[in-house]
Amino acid sequence: MAIGERLKEEREAKKLTLDDIQKMTKIQTRYLYAIENENFEVMPGAFYVRAFIKEYAMAVNLNPEELMEEYHEDLPFNEQEASPALSRVQSSKKNTTTSVSSPAIFSFLPTVIVVLLIIGIVVVVWLFKQGTFSDLTSTGGENVTEQQEESNGGDTVELPPDSDAPAEEEDADNEEDAENEDETTEEDQEQEQEEEAASSSITLENHENNESTYELQLEEEELILSITSSDRNWLEVYDGNGETFYEKTLTAEEGTVEFDFSDKEQISLRFGAPNAIDIDVNDLDVELSEEINAGDVPRVYININR
């Protein structure tokens, strides 16, 4: 019995139609019909023949690995397709323009300037408290008095006494400026910490039976899903209600495809070449589980928490 007849027999034994299998596997009915009749030429490629047969087998409660091993010699695709030449890390962001970073020293200049300014203010305040400027003023006053006495033929000219009030007021102003600088620096640091704490994050919560569940903590109002593939890749994209956003083969020539999920609560993905795909959510890289192999057809669920 051929593999197509075997699958058809199991389906009919369970009283399932091809439409039922299509709903369970999301594989188009024409491909399911082609599998049962072993008309593999209509498939997108040998890789998808293996993937679709595995999905069909699981839908009718057959062990896909044992089935593939049993009919290994009968199938027309014994030679494995070449795996994608690029890894996910090498292929990610290949269309993104590299930004030129400014020299590191410029990022420290504002801090250095503020520190020097504070040190200068503290030194000036300390000199005022030590009476350095008062002594200089007094010395200058005495010299002026002596010169005036000599020019007036010995007559004494008394100058009005210096007042310490302006110096005290300047000291208070300088201290207040220093305190304002410290408060501004602390406010800037608190604002930076709040902005960092408010950034979005995505975490892989569970991976079982070739299904991965992620939790996305979203802090922005807009949610953009971006997908790129470095090779031919069968891709399906749905929301939590089963609405189809994409269902066809994604190629490297097509570039990055984007979908707006700003008003959705869940994202659902399924793809045929996990080593060739790169998935981003608002520029956050969705890292696939290490348990996913090159020949798997994984399903990914992303729950959105706002």
Image: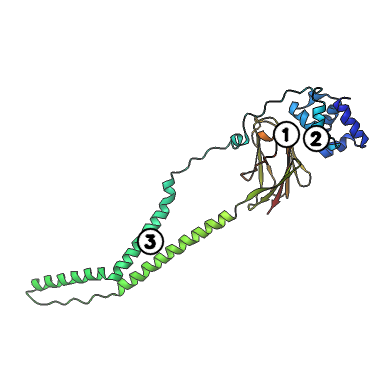
* Depth order, front residue of 3/52: 3
Query: Along the horizontal axis of the image, is 198 left or right of 60?
Result: left
The amino acid at mark 1 is Gly
Query: Along the horizontal axis of the image, is 179 left or right of 302?
Result: left
Query: Along the horizontal axis of the image, is 115 left or right of 278?
Result: left
Residue 205: percent from left, percent from top: 69, 48
Asked if residue 45 can be seen in this view, the reply is no
Residue 161: percent from left, percent from top: 22, 77
Residue shown at the point (47%, 42%) measured from the top left? 101
The amino acid at mark 3 is Ile
The kind of secondary structure element at disc 2 is helix
Asked if residue 229 can be seen in this view, the reply is yes
Q: Earlier in the sequence, mark 2 or mark 1?
A: 2
Residue shown at the point (59%, 37%) measured from the top left? 93
The kind of secondary structure element at disc 3 is helix
What residue did someone put label 3 on? Answer: 118
The amino acid at mark 2 is Glu
Instruction: Mark 3 and mark 2 in contact? Answer it, CB < 8 Å.
Output: no
What residue did someone put label 1 on? Answer: 272
Q: Earlier in the sequence, mark 3 or mark 2?
A: 2
Q: Which quadrant holds the N terminus?
A: top right
Residue shown at the point (7%, 75%) measured from the top left? 154
